Amino acid sequence: MAGAGPKKSKVFRYLKYIFLAVLCVLLSLFTVALLRTLSLNVNVGLQLAHWEETNHIGLDLSQRQREEMLTRFKEAIRIPTVSYSPTDLNTTALREFSSLLRKAFPTVFASSLVQHEVVAEYSHLFWVQGSQPDLLPYMLLAHIDVVPASESDGWEAPPFSAKEIDDFIYGRGTLDNKECVMGILQALEYLLLRGYAPRRGFYIGLGHDEEVSGFNGAMNVARLLEQRHVQLSFLLDEGLLVVDGVLKGLDGPAALIGVTEKGMATVKLSVITAPGHSSMPPRESSIGILAAAVKRLEDNPMPMLFGQGPERGTFEHLAHKFNFPLRFMASNLWLFAPIVGRFLALKPETNAITRTTTAVTMFNGGVKYNILPSVAEAYVNLRIHSAHSVREVMDLMEWTVGDQRVRMDLVEGFDPLPVSSYSETSFGFQILKKSILDVFPQLTVAPGVCMANTDSRHYKDLTTGVYRFAPIWAKPGDAQRIHGINERISKKNYEDMVGFYSTLIQNCDVRTLPESHSGVHEF
Ligand SMILES: CC/C=C\C/C=C\C/C=C\C/C=C\C/C=C\C/C=C\CCC(=O)O
Ligand SMILES: N[C@@H](Cc1ccccc1)C(=O)O
Ligand SMILES: [Zn+2]
Ligand SMILES: [Zn+2]
């Protein structure tokens, strides 16, 4: 065994160097990460800049006006403008809603500054003329229709009652989306009453079939504007909101502005086998084959893509508001994205940020208990992450199911929407951010990905600045109220909505953004 000793110590000497090298690398990685943690505060920027002075009319509502405005909002909630399918809308309710708008906002309809058109029978387009026609107009969107609701699902108040419980107004449409429909027009009504005339002109579009894709309402409004060669500075629709306690470890509430929305695919799965007598069954039925396929889809979620889309920007903007160790991780997604992603995947509303989601929504098969089912069908609704496409998702699904007997047809689908700018030079984003902070100084503003779809996707040829946000206060559990039971909004929140739109409309009167580090920007 001669020579073993010196060899060993040689190896030991190398090991020592390797260990030192690894330590050095780790230390420098740690230093980089720490520096990023300390320096990453993308949230200051234009807040400190000097904004052009414009007159600001405060709302200063009297008690009587407050009550009046809540009464009108409740009236809107009581009209059951339900969309069941593109061919099954409650048109009686939609017609009634048009009359309510005229009654509730007489100044809007009478003003010489406002032009109103009905589009596709039940949708509305308003043009509010600006005194400076060289300023590019912007547009506010909302939708009148709602999804169905039945009291027997467990509502504390009938869903079309607008009943008040503990300073909340309950009802279908209080969060999605009559608070925006009424909030926008109420703000305009008060501004016009106080003699306000905008410098920058703007459109208001109210769709009537958003919940069934908007192919009649939003699509035709957008088409009309395209025919008129309208270009928009930016567009604001429903979508993301204020999250308060929803993201664990975040200090204080945050306003998330949707700068994009996920894509969607509805896929029909079907299995066909020979029918026959149930007394002589084959080993597998069409129902069994389909059930196994569906189970494989649920057991194998789409890959984790957290950090590969604009959700990365969300966490970088919020990083300085997270407590340790989350601040360290959110500032260094280049290293920690897989860990943060896994953590977010624990809850459905944050899992939706991390991947393309798979929801099995319908399942049918069989006609009689003693006939072997010849056809079994299921529908899967996928919401596609920004880093995925319909094509890729279909391929992944086929691979996961891995059974030639399961036929897959794409019923409807579209890719994720383009990402709107959220830089310091983006007029739309910065005006929204300023308006949010003017009304709610306690908020942190960040870009986000809207997990559901909105009417705004029909407007993508009119502007590249599409934003999805309303200042709805969402606490833990509130996300489930949207399309769910006990949808409600606090009275204070509705008043704040009106205040927000009033401020936003007036803030849009600036000609340009103030000078930032990167220079001046003309619009
Ligand atoms: C990347 C960051 C994004 C989200 C942050 C985390 C949590 C979000 C939590 C709750 C969000 C709740 C609701 C928003 C989702 C759906 C409503 C949006 C549009 C409605 C479209 C419609 O059905 O009419
Ligand atoms: N907004 C609804 C309905 C919708 C679906 C798909 C496209 C457009 C609208 C949703 O996201 O579920
Ligand atoms: Zn909606
Ligand atoms: Zn909805």
Image (tube, rainbow, N blue to C red):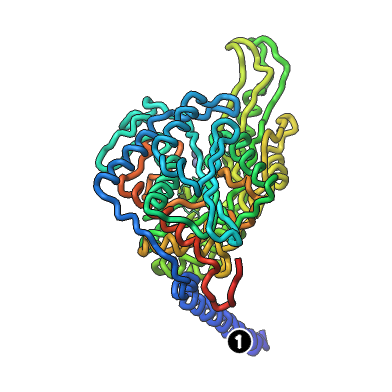
Task: Decide if residue 101 is on the left or right side of residue 389.
Answer: left
- Residue 301 or 357: which is nearer the viewer? 357
Task: Decide if residue 106 is on the left or right side of residue 510.
Answer: left
- Residue 229 or 391: which is nearer the viewer? 229
| SS category of the residue bearing label 1 | helix
- The vertical placement of 127 against 270, above or below, is below
Residue at numbered disc 1 = 17
| Residue 217 % position (x, y) | 59, 36
Identify the residue at horizontal 59%, vertical 48% (top origin).
262
- The vertical placement of 501 against 26, above or below, is above
Q: Does any portion of residue 338 appear in the rendered image?
A: no
The type of residue carrying mark 1 is: Tyr
Identify the residue at horizontal 41%, vertical 43% (top origin).
107
Q: Quadrant of residue 86?
A: top right
- Residue 131 or 18: which is nearer the viewer? 131
- Residue 140 or 117: which is nearer the viewer? 117
Q: How many marks?
A: 1
| Residue 56 % position (x, y) | 39, 62
- In the picture as drawn, the residue positioned furthest to the front comes out as 112
- The vertical placement of 187 against 480, above or below, is below
- In the picture as drawn, the residue positioned furthest to the right comes out as 404
Identify the residue at horizontal 59%, vertical 44% (top origin).
383
Tell me the quadrant of the picture where the N terminus can be found.
Answer: bottom right
Task: Decide if residue 154 is on the left or right side of residue 91.
Answer: left
- The vertical placement of 26 against 286, above or below, is below
| Residue 84 % position (x, y) | 53, 27
| Dot 1 alpha-carbon crowd within 10 angstroms: few under 14, some 14 to 19, many 20 or more | few
Identify the residue at horizontal 37%, vertical 59% (top origin).
57
